[in-house]
Amino acid sequence: MKYFILLTIVFFILTSCSDNKPHNDVSNIVKTESKQEVNFDKRTSLKLNAKQKNHQLKNMRSHLIAIQSIIDLLADGNYDDASTVAYTQLGSTTEMKLMCASFGNEQFENLGLEFHQSADEMSEIFKEKNHKKSLKALSHTMDYCIRCHETFKQ
């Protein structure tokens, strides 16, 4: 079950982070459909340059790795280490706060800060060692990921 949840999360994030361009030289039909999808993409662009895009993708992938680690740790009943990962890798560190503010979009900044604060709260809930509450907290934090990827694009 944990692997199904993990695969679902990874699939969502990877498809949300894609640049909507085919990565192979495939048929013109696929290329045309991809162009049409871009035209229907109503998310707000953060207007990032190439360096910023690469940095942001690296950051988002590190968040995914942290989520994967948390899922594995919770599955093993290792709540203390899950709490540490949540706080140190997803929490409201000074670095994360500065990064959220660096994009020049107040809505993005606020959503990012709420995400990191929810990770802090999730970390505290993990310390209670309550499986159901821990999964609810993880789901709540993941909701910020979904909202952000639904709202913004690079």
Image: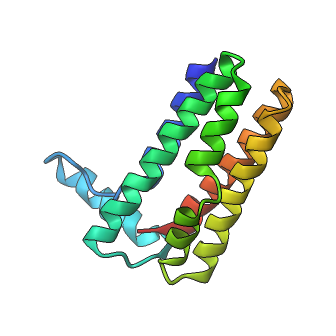
Q: Name the side, left or right, on which 67 lies relative to 77.
A: left
Of 86 and 29, nearer the camera is 86
Of 40 and 5, nearer the camera is 5
Q: In this view, does 46 lie above or below 12?
A: below
Residue 150 screen position, x and y as percent: 58, 61
Badge count: 0
Where the C terminus falls, by quadrant?
bottom left
| Quadrant housing residue 24 | top left
Q: In this view, does 54 lie above or below 1?
A: below
Q: Name the side, left or right, on which 40 lies relative to 125.
A: left
Residue 137 screen position, x and y as percent: 78, 41
Q: Is residue 23 above or below residue 133?
A: below
| Residue depicted at 24% across the width and 52% down the height | 29
Of 60 and 79, nearer the camera is 79
Residue 26 screen position, x and y as percent: 17, 46
| Residue depicted at 82% across the width and 39% down the height | 125
Q: Name the side, left or right, on which 103 lies relative to 130.
A: left
| Residue depicted at 54% across the width and 32% down the height | 68
| Residue depicted at 24% across the width and 56% down the height | 31
Residue 72 screen position, x and y as percent: 59, 23
